[in-house]
Image (tube, helix red, strand yellow):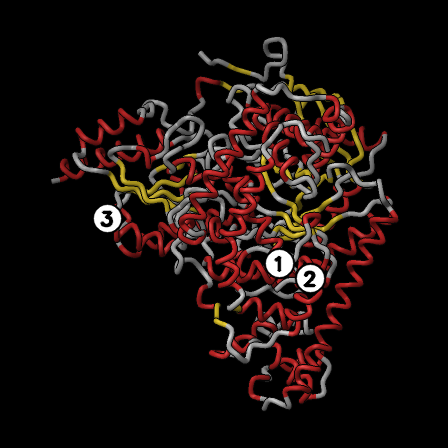
Amino acid sequence: MAQIVKPYGDTLDDGRVQLSFTLPVPCGPRALEAAREIVLTWGFSECEIAHAAAMADSFTFFVAYAKTEHGIDFDLVKADVDESTHPMTMDETDEFIRKEIGRKVIVVGACTGFDAHTVGIDAIMNMKGYNHHFGLERYQMIEAHNLGAQVPNEKLIEYAEKCRADAILVSQVVTQKDIHIQNLTRLIELLEAAGTRDRYVCVAGGPRLSNKLAAQLGYDAGFGKGSYADDVASFIVRKMVERKKNEQLLR
Amino acid sequence: MREKLGLSKEKIAEARERAISIVEPVMSFVDRHTSVTVERATVRLLGADGANGDGVPVPNLIVDSLGGALGDGAAARYANAVLATELTPAELNDRVAKGFDISKIPMSDRAKVHAMGEQLARQNLDRVDQNRSFREQKLRQYEGRNNNPLLYLIVATGNIYEDVKQAQSAALRGADVIAVIRTTAQSLLDYVPYGATTEGFGGTYATQENFRIMRNALDEICEREHRYIYLTNYASGLCMPEIAAMGALERLDMMLNDSMYGILFRDINMYRTFVDQKFSRMINAYAGIIINTGEDNYLTTSDAYEKAYTVLASQFLNERFAYAAGLKPSQMGLGHAFEMDPSIPNGFLYEYAQAQMAREIFPEHPLKYMPPTKHMSGDIFKGLVMDTMFNFVSKATGQNIHLLGMLTEAIHTPFMMDRYIAVDTAKYVMDNMADFGDEVEFRKDGVIVKRAHEVLDQTLDFLREVERLGLMDSIEQGLFADIKRPKDGGKGLEGLAEKADEYWNPVEQQLKSALAVR
């Protein structure tokens, strides 16, 4: 049976939504009416402008509350992530590697292109990790190489080859004008041209990245906001084992 | 400012002594060397400007033509060319842009060349003098109209004309300082692009023309609001001194300008950075520009609670490097940040302690305080509360340059409305608790006092260790920000040269004499 859900304000199915936005018009009664009407064109059935303020000569800021009649069938929604496999803890991952792989897993990571923001790759790789989730450097069974920021794709591949990496992590924080997509695509193209794509588990990460997008660009997985080293490490080692099994089956 | 923490004067003095002996050996290396960008900054301050059809700037064409003679400096070559061709610098620049190689002109009589070089340097430094007096006159005229602390906002659209709209709107709402953040690749370019630009990633190119466009836009608001609007850019990366020179010529008021940031966070060679930072800081000192140092970066890389002492240690070192370049304490915007994990119990007290500590140790310095970024989650509502805690500490401890936090940090480059909310709520908090700082004392054995003493003690231990190893070896071994940088590694080392006996630089001479720097 369909389970239709709607936004919840204070009563089930009231459809109440809170919005804030800016219009490039001077603040005044016409601006308020324009704001209200534009919200209605977005498919809302009611709209109340709770607050309007002049931010500059011809820019007005609004806070609006609106009501939607639209709902969604929750049973038909498929998540972007594979929820069936929960991430393992650091100790579980180390144990998994000992049992299933039997040697240290080598991971190379970098923030590529001109992107200078190491915060993402550091959160995953640095010993300290982020938000009480230790980074890959802390794992006993992972040898982690963090190359830092502004690493050219070519350099990253060269390094991965040199240290015989099992996985390549790429972080992209800057997304203005889709620079991250060009950068991420380029890495896969280079790997494919060299015929070494299948040697690595390729993982992309960044606050604006989704698993879907990463898959489209040819990565094995993508990790967005709220991901930790646990998620990344679990994915890499499971993927390695899955690949090994597939290879054995093919033989 | 009343002292409340009872910090040991002896310990603070010892930290400064240690900083002197850490910086001294680096400065003796610095004074014997020059770099491509020091020379380009020099010819810029003699009048070199413009670019050729491929976008290669005239200062680069001139300095590249020196080849192996970089150690002689570029000033004599440029002055000689002006003398021999009898062209104005502008006419000469045009010819250089079209392919004229000034290194081929035979050298005229040394005395005449030097006289010409000194005259050209004087003309350009006169323009810097005028900028400085104009700023001082406006600050006097509109005294008391700025917020305290100064509210600092960043614009970053990539398009200078779009930046102008955002900056004017922010200034009209009440921002006192506008920083045009640079495009993400610029710190690693070994040249400064020429002209107005409309394309950038995560920021806008720093060019002299962009500086001029934004300066004019902010001056408009200054006259309309009767409040001086400070303009900020980034004298960092591979072109520190050139950006400083351009900023001096176009009346920027603040420059991000750290002595070690490029080494640690941009992997620029350490010898190159140490040489470049001094020349850039002398220009900033002369131009009356307030530098902003980058200590906040230590806390976004490492844990803000555990590594608080690296911030204080870096402040002592930045202060010493700044003195060595002729900056006055009133120009040293030493940085720090409110970056602790919000789940730490009493985190607010620790932040308060550290901000108060910075205030007491650096009483005359315009401290630059940075908002939470690392632990901003995308929950804009909680983010606004974190920014509010930060605003409170900043006002209560008398910080000077307050970088406004954005509730949408970690989501996108700020929308106009994000900045509006930031200014509006910060003004509310700061007005509402205006004199709070003067009303409170701290318990002598309380959390706040203890924390400040602990961080000072850790800083002293750390500085002793750095002194024992030497600064460059300490960086090589990863003592700063857990980042290891080999001495000969990083970018830009090839652009460094030992000064030859022939080395001559009239800009450097005039700066040093005006600043009483050796």
Chain containing the residue with disc 1:
B
Q: Residues under labels 1 and 3: Cα distance?
A: 47 Å
- The residue that label 2 is drawn on is B515
Of tags 2 and 3, the one toward the viewer is 2
Can residue A21 be seen here? The reply is no
Q: Amino acid at mark 3?
A: Arg
- The residue that label 3 is drawn on is A164
Q: Secondary structure at mark 2?
A: helix
Identity of the residue furthest to the top in this view: A11
In the rendering, at what x and y percent does residue B221 appear?
82, 48
Q: Residues under labels 1 and 2: Cα distance?
A: 8 Å
Pointers 2 and 3 within a single chain: no
Looking at the picture, tell me which residue is in the foreground, B261 or B421: B261
| Cβ atoms at labels 1 and 2 below 8 Å apart | yes
Chain containing the residue with disc 2:
B
Of tags 1 and 3, the one toward the viewer is 1
In the image, residue B391 above or below residue B300: above
- The residue that label 1 is drawn on is B325
Q: Amino acid at mark 1?
A: Ala
Residue at 58% in and 39% down: B12
The local crowd at label 1, few if under 14, some if 14 to 19, many if 20 or more residues have their Cα within 10 Å, is: many
Q: Amino acid at mark 2?
A: Leu
Considering the image in quadrants, where does the C terminus of chain B appear?
Answer: bottom right
| Cβ atoms at labels 2 and 3 below 8 Å apart | no
Q: Is residue B470 left or right of residue B342?
A: left
Looking at the picture, tell me which residue is in the foreground, A104 or B452: B452
The picture quadrant where one finds residue A125 is: top left
